[in-house]
Amino acid sequence: MKYNKKKLYLIIPIVLFLGLLAIFIKDIIQMLPLIKNADEESVRAALSTLGPKGAIVIGCIVAVQLLIVFMPCEFMEIMSGVAYGPWWGTLICLTGVIVGASLIYALINVFNVKLEVLFAKSKSYETISKLSRSTKSIGKLLLILFFLPAIPLGVICYFGSTTNLKYHWYILITAIGALPSIVIDTVLGHVFVAAIGKYFWWILIAVVLFAVIAMWLVKLYTTKKMNIALYGTKNPTVDMVLDNHKPSSPKVTHIWFLTRVARHLKRKYNVKVNNEETKNLKDPFIVLSPHGCWADFLLTFLAIKPYKTHIMMNAYYLYNKKTQGILLDTGVIPKKMFANDLKSIKDCMAVVKNGESILMMPEARLSIDGANQPFAHGLGKLIKKLNIPVITIESHGAYLSMAKWVETKRKGAIEITTHLTLTPEKIQELSADEIDDICAKALAFNDFEWVKDSPYVFKGKNMLEGAENLIYKCPKCGHEYTLIADKNTITCTHCGLQVSMNGKYQFINPYGNIHNLQDWYKYQRVEAQKVYDSGNFKLETEVVLKTYDDYGKGIVPVGEGKCVLDKDGLRYDGTFKGEEHHLAIPAHAMQALPFGCGEDFETYWDNIFYYFVPKENKAQCVQWGIYSDIMIQNAKKDE
């Protein structure tokens, strides 16, 4: 019922707006031949034929625009000035504002319609709510907001209707606050009439350019003022923004776009979905997905209704202003991976309280060898705290289609099945550890075993390209970093070993017990364990250190030095932002050392993100990942 109500309140104003706008545009189009090349007097005579009907239509459009919070009123105010001059134009638009504001007040205070149903909880509304906590006078705040044109007029009216202001004060403040911008717009429209006949197209182009530049300047000015009010500085750091951000409902437009991308991937990679078990489950719920490839969250959107689903995502991606706003509008919950992050837990609780769902990949890193990884710490405790149904995704083929080391596309098939794994009643009966075990079993996958018995064959021109960033040790001669992957063949440049792979990801001419890439990766782990047990375990390399830019420029270089990994843990000795810096993370304090194939290895410590890029031989990153896993496992045994 709530969903239908929301849909109704969304559709009615939009249909009214489009209908009224169509009537107005139809009348204007009929006049174009009369005003394009006429003098000022003829233009005014033509516009006067709009009469009372046009005035009523413009007033109604302005009123409806307030109900649709994301629609600006400036265009109709300018057109009102064009058609009726500054005095009558101002009166028409002001009447429309008063009618629209009164409708909003009535919906909230007379008919008791919830704000969520009126879809007014936008980013602007959240900003206003934050500002209201630091002011004693709501009336004064409303007046100030009217002079910050980047905030839609409708949002201000929605906010004012939820305060303790009496109607007469509310409508008076709204009228006074809206009047200056209406006067400016109608005067501007009136001025255009004087030259519209002679310079019609030039004026049209000028109006568009003026609107774009004005909106940019207003946004720039308003953003600075808002930042000062919210954060005490006009240029807040990313941490300030994320710490103050509360997850808002995913924007329909953003989710619509992501689902279209997901459907494209479905066709491109032959994705098959079975969601019969969960398709009728109502929000809120938790969706747990394995992490075989980068597109798992998109593939999951094919199996669930994503419009109320928040994606828990590595905070790494939100430290870039170019994508930060888009991700936050998509409902992303930032999480600092393999680090204590209480803010992400609070965000999850807020999302569930709002009746919305959460999608997370508890392995917190991409699969390395086509099978699942250990979970990040604390999943069972979080599930018990939230106590809502848990959906798990059974996925096969994603790794073979888009593995982390893959550089070219290949097509076979991806199978996705959803299961209702835990209900609130079952969660209450289980311990956090038992929940972890159940979820781990539900998410377990092994794509190399699955493809053997499946009917699918994977095809691509360069199936093994990039594999040298996953496998680094030759099983025949034992030399490291002598392997070259080309098309469907791997060759050792030292001893000449050569193996080729077929469409089932199996080697046609296997060496010993190594029948596929997973076997090869396991061989490397066994060899690494031998080195660890021998007591000669030590990795070291010169690195460039990167970290988050405080002001949203992404990951930037901040120093250089040497990294060392041994039984004691991970160390870095070098520079950090121009100063000498020493990092030492004990083995028992680490959960994992995520890495990018041929790119980097990374970790959080003391709320700092360390992104290490080897200066030479970036293929060694996988070796750091293997040895760190062995080190961490042995450290846990010794505790």
Image (tube, rainbow, N blue to C red):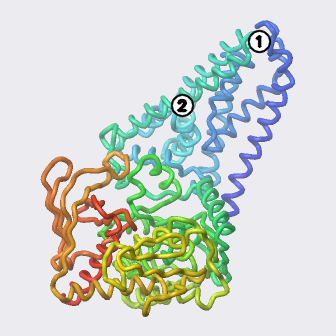
Q: Secondary structure at mark 1?
A: loop
Rendered view: 529 above or below 576 = below
Report which quarter residue 84 is drawn in. Answer: top right
> Where the C terminus falls, by quadrant?
bottom left
Q: Nearer the viewer, residue 481 or 410?
A: 481
Q: Residues within 10 Å of mark 2 (few under 14, many from 20)?
A: some
Report which quarter residue 416 is drawn in. Answer: bottom right
What is the distance, in whole Å, between disc 1 and disc 2 at their CAs? 26 Å
Rendered view: 182 above or below 288 = above
Q: Secondary structure at mark 2?
A: helix
Q: Is residue 505 visible?
A: yes
Residue at 66% in and 77% down: 273
Q: Say what amino acid the circle numbered 1 marks.
A: Gly
The residue carrying mark 2 is: 215
The residue carrying mark 1 is: 197
Rendered view: 590 above or below 224 = below
Q: Residues within 10 Å of mark 1 (few under 14, many from 20)?
A: many
Q: List x then y, in percent, for residue 635.
A: 21, 84
Q: Is residue 358 visible?
A: no
